[in-house]
Image: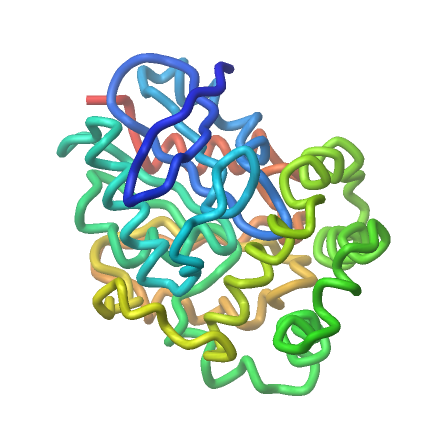
Amino acid sequence: MEIRTIHANGVEFAYLTVGEGPLALCLHGFPDTAHTWRHLMPELAARGYRAVAPFMRGYAPTEIPADGAYEGAALVADVRALHEELGGGDDAVVIGHDWGAFPVYATADRFRRAVALAAPPVKGIAARFLEYEQLKRSFYIFLFQTPLAESAASSPEFIQGLWRDWSPGYDPGQDLEFVRRSIGEPANLGAAIGYYRAMLGTTPPSGRYPDVDPGPAGPVLYLHGAQDGCLAAELAKDVRSHLPAGSRAEQVEGAGHFLHLERPDEVNRLILDWLGPAS
């Protein structure tokens, strides 16, 4: 895979790419990097796609956005701009995991096919998110609203602990090194935490981006790990009722939050079957 850069929505994005053909845009989450798609991207290329995995805003080597905006509307604007600048067209597809899933929902109508992993639509989890067991899993979200966030998250043991809890039994050694390179510096770590501060309103909206409907704008394939320690599988059991007509939802047994890394063969098959060959 090559690494390249592109200017989109006022941000200089770095991205991994492989293959030629219609765009397959792959969006990562936290605490993760574009390298999370290393199993899927060669398979997309073999199917005739041009797989592109950007490092999300604030995640090195992508630059920290000058506007300091990390609200959902900024992420959606990024995806729209990347689609345009990369020459996506009507035959492009999009895949997003964790934070990367949120702009997938809002932009699904711009892509021929869309896939979301490990983060159900907000309306689908709102009622159960405040249940006690889920609140325990989500402690880090509330920690990130405080001045202690950067100090706590700068410890390698903190990030390692999230991966251990979210994907039990998976060895994230290589992934943790990628994460260290991407958000190991204080400014980049602050950017990654900024997504969560914007999510709960601790950081007010920048005002630069119009509000967007976070609900799915088109059919989506939704995948969730049965042993997800970040967002319990129970939160996703009714996800199909919150997806548009023509959508599909699957639970992947023996996988946690990073299901595409834990069960790459199965997850790749589900995604590729949904996407079909490049048109």
In which quadrant will I find the C terminus?
A: top left
How many marks overall?
A: 0
Q: Tell me if 135 is positioned left or right of 61 in this view.
A: right
Image quadrant assignment for residue 141: bottom right
Q: Position of residue 208 (x, y in %)?
A: 27, 63
For the residue pair 249 and 211, the one nearer the viewer reads as 211
For the residue pair 100 and 156, the one nearer the viewer reads as 156
Q: Tell me if 23 is positioned left or right of 146 in this view.
A: left
Q: Residue at x 48, y 15 (%)?
A: 2
Q: Position of residue 52 (x, y in %)?
A: 39, 27
* Relative to 115, residue 21 above or below: above
Q: Position of residue 191 (x, y in %)?
A: 55, 55
Q: Residue at x 72, y 40 (%)?
A: 180
Outermost residue toward the front in this view: 66
* Relative to 90, residue 97 above or below: below
Q: Tell me if 99 is positioned left or right of 139 in this view.
A: left
For the residue pair 49 and 196, the one nearer the viewer reads as 196
Q: Residue at x 75, y 31 (%)?
A: 174
Q: Residue at x 32, y 47 (%)?
A: 78
Image quadrant assignment for residue 38: top right
Which color scheme did the rendering employ for the protein? rainbow
Outermost residue toward the right in this view: 157
* Relative to 264, residue 249 above or below: below
Q: Tell me if 11 is positioned left or right of 98 in this view.
A: left
